[in-house]
Image (spheres, helix red, strand yellow):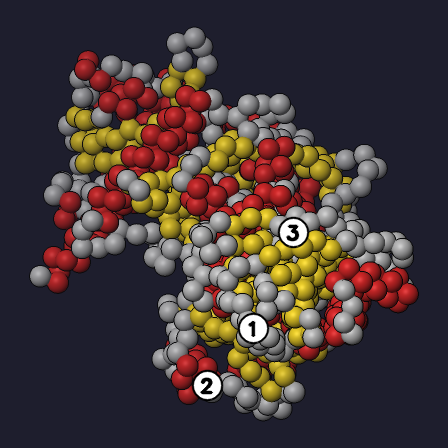
Amino acid sequence: MGARLFATSAERAAERDDVLVDAVLRAVEVSGAHAASVFLVSADGSALVLAAAAGMPPSLLGGWRRIAVNSPIPVAEAFRAGRTVHLADAEATVRRFPQLAIAVPYPFGSASVPVAAGRDILGVLAVVWAAKPGGEGLSKARRRHLRTTAGRLGTALARLRAGDTDGGTPEAPLEVPIPAVSAVRVGLFDWDVSTGRLTADATACAIFGLNPDEFDERAATLAAQVHPADRQAFRAAARDAVKDGRVLARCVRIPETGGGHRTIELWGRVPTPHDGADAASHVVGGVLDLGSGMAAAAALERLADGFFALDRDGRITYANHRLVRLVHTRRGDLVGRRPWEALPWLADPAFEDRFRAAQVSQQPVSFLVRSPRERLLFSLRPDTQGTTGWVTPASDPGPTIADVVPGQDSAGPAPTRPGALYRILEMSSALTEAVTALDVCGVVADQLLPAFGGHRLAAYVVREGRLHLLCQRGYHESFLDRFEGISLRQAWGPVTGSLAGGTPLFIETPQELARAYPELEALSRSLGFLPLIASSRPVGALVLGFDEVHRFTGEERGLLSALSGLIAQALERARLYDAKNALAHGLQHALLPHELPTLPGVNVTGRYLPATAWMDIGGDWYDAIGTDHGIALVVGDVEGHNVAAAATMGQLRSAVRAFASAGLRPSEVVAATNRLLIDLGPGLLASCCYVLLDPATGAAHVVRAGHCPPLLHRPDGRTETVEPPGGPLLGIDRGAEYPQAPLTLSPGCLLALYTDGLVETRDADITAGIDRLRTQLAHADTDSLDKLADALLHSAKHAPKRTDDIALLLTEYTRAVSV
């Protein structure tokens, strides 16, 4: 049973691979693009994983083998939105995805199409083409064909995943070659030397210029097609095979009808006894027609310039004699290697970037290079099968991409692939928007885990020389407890050890983990410990865990080291914000009333909500003051979001309390507060709404100084905006007058005073916000004043980037009180 399940799983995997290969080849065909790739969503749904690529080797995609689903990149957006993302050219890419354009600054167009089955999106099919200036990209018909291809792929993958196996992503991306028309023909033959009978397939007959249906299976017939001068060599090939057991590349010429001739090669051997043939009389083998290839290669060898061929992965497959002389190395040291690997003076990252530019854009690229002996002009001509290179000595005195002094070490740094550069740009951009330390942790987990295939992450911060857990994803508390509170002076552990040395520590296998840290064995298959160091000072550490063995490539190690520096700077900045924010809001809390007065017939509750998009505190306040003439209710707002605004707010609040307690009329309280603000000279303006309510009669007087109008909710449910005449903002005119307007409250009435942060938004007029609050108050449950206050602030509390703070004061008049 187990063997049968294994076979079924292998069959499904093979069928899945066939489906993926067919999809990328079909995508290239229907779109006219030069490259296509399929990304499938990972098992945990956090990343898109490269499954197959045609026309673009996976090695060239570098850091884009795993893409976080929340990344600002076309493939991820197509997955999230469930629609096609079409970028006609480089200009369209710059407008919509500027980070991608910086990382891959080459002229190309792209289209990303969701791969879906019903409502489930399984991945994305993407194509890339050489963009022309002012081009319109793919036509509507080509985009429709591409969506059809993606739909067929989604249906096939869903069918495969419906079985016992997951039918998921291949362990390694499938590299799919785009079919090319080959100039090489290979025919097969079986030659019985003793009888002269020779059977040949149709290709072998065609190579000799014979009609397969008319061939009489005589070796003499084939010999007659050979150039007269080579017929002896043709017959000798059979004798040599019988004598030596094989024939290796015996060349003969076939005359052409229009004149000239073609050179073909004969290869063969005498079968061994177990082949079931008479070893003394039979020769089996093939006839190879290279077309014009041999003549072309010979011609290239005679040229005065250097020529070479690169496969799609950048490795040299051919180098002519002149190139070998120009670069002063052996042909064997070139073939099979990349130019920047074979020639030290080409190790500058710019060379690989030029090769990448040619591959991605499918456009010619030329540049100058200084070799140890002379300046050379390189020119690259790409197509979907590879790249042809041309090299010649240059007299142009212009700048070169590599200026290496002969005799010096020219190994150079490893090139930074565009995927790695994009990761750095993406992380940097996301971290700039992270305000708090927990925000930084969220960004790091969202970016690092899907990008590198990790499953768990823990972030520690250094406080008073010890490690303390800041946040974690996926770890058990028992694992994290062993690092909590460890002093940095204890260098026994991997976290403190990496911090002490200032370099990351990578443990790739369970065996390596067991040898180095047996107490951590079986917790993860692979681990990465990244020190977070800012301004030469340790600020924390990251622990990255993998459920499967993960081999950290050199590029990954360098990228993680670079990212750890960015994370450290962001974490240090966020910790400073957290400390400053806690201090500022502590000050704000101290300036607001800790307890509101309790009077017969009146219930009062207040709320203050700080802004979420600012570091500092604001100037909003509320207060309720018991006086000999009733209860004074006030809500105010000093402009600004800083300590100066909060300090001014505290002074105004104290002044209002003093003037109200002294028995001044409401208009006099506000006027006196205005003069005080001008005398203080802070250069700030303020608004306020002041109400004096007599609980004995329900009579109230309202004064406004450039502030939002109160809202009055009556017992029958009617809710209205109270808009008495008001005066200007406080702090403008020393002689300004602030009229007071009468207002009568009946038992069961509810009065709402608030600041503009509750009703004003960037995309809506403040009048619309006031009306929205009035409607909300009209339909709210008023049985509990505290619950009502929380309900009115609910939307504001959950707004992600609220730019203003809010003060709210609710007063319920329950009954008249006899005096």
Q: Residue at x 42, y 31 (%)?
A: 28
Q: Earlier in the sequence, mark 1 or mark 2?
A: 2
Where 336 falls versus 320 (above or below)? below
At x 54% / y 51%, what residue is drawn? 773
Q: Secondary structure at mark 1?
A: loop
Q: Report the front residue among 325 and 381.
A: 381
The amino acid on which the numbered mark 3 sits, given as a three-letter code, is Pro
Name the residue carrying label 3.
Answer: 709
**Which amino acid is tagged 1?**
Ser
Q: Residues within 10 Å of mark 2 (few under 14, many from 20)?
A: few
Label 3 to label 2: alpha-carbon separation: 55 Å
Tell me the element at label 2.
Answer: helix
* N-term mark: 3 or 2: 2
Q: Residue at x 56, y 73 (%)?
A: 818
For this orientation, the residue located farthest to the front is: 819
Would you name the residue on which mark 1 appears? 818
Q: Position of residue 153 (x, y in %)?
A: 30, 38
Single out the mark in the foreground, 3 or 1. 1
Residue 560 in sight from this viewpoint? no
Circle 2: residue type:
Asp
Name, please, the residue furthest toward the left. Answer: 1
Determine which of the numbered discs, if any, sits on residue 481 in the image.
2
Q: Position of residue 55 (x, y in %)?
A: 46, 37
Which quadrant of the view contains residue 394? top right
Q: In the image, is residue 171 above or below residue 131?
A: below
**Position of 474 relative to 711 (above/below):** below
> Marks 2 and 1: in contact by CB < 8 Å?
no
Q: Are marks 3 and 2 in contact (CB under 8 Å)?
A: no
| Occupied quadrant, residue 353 | top right
Residue 379 picture quarter: top right
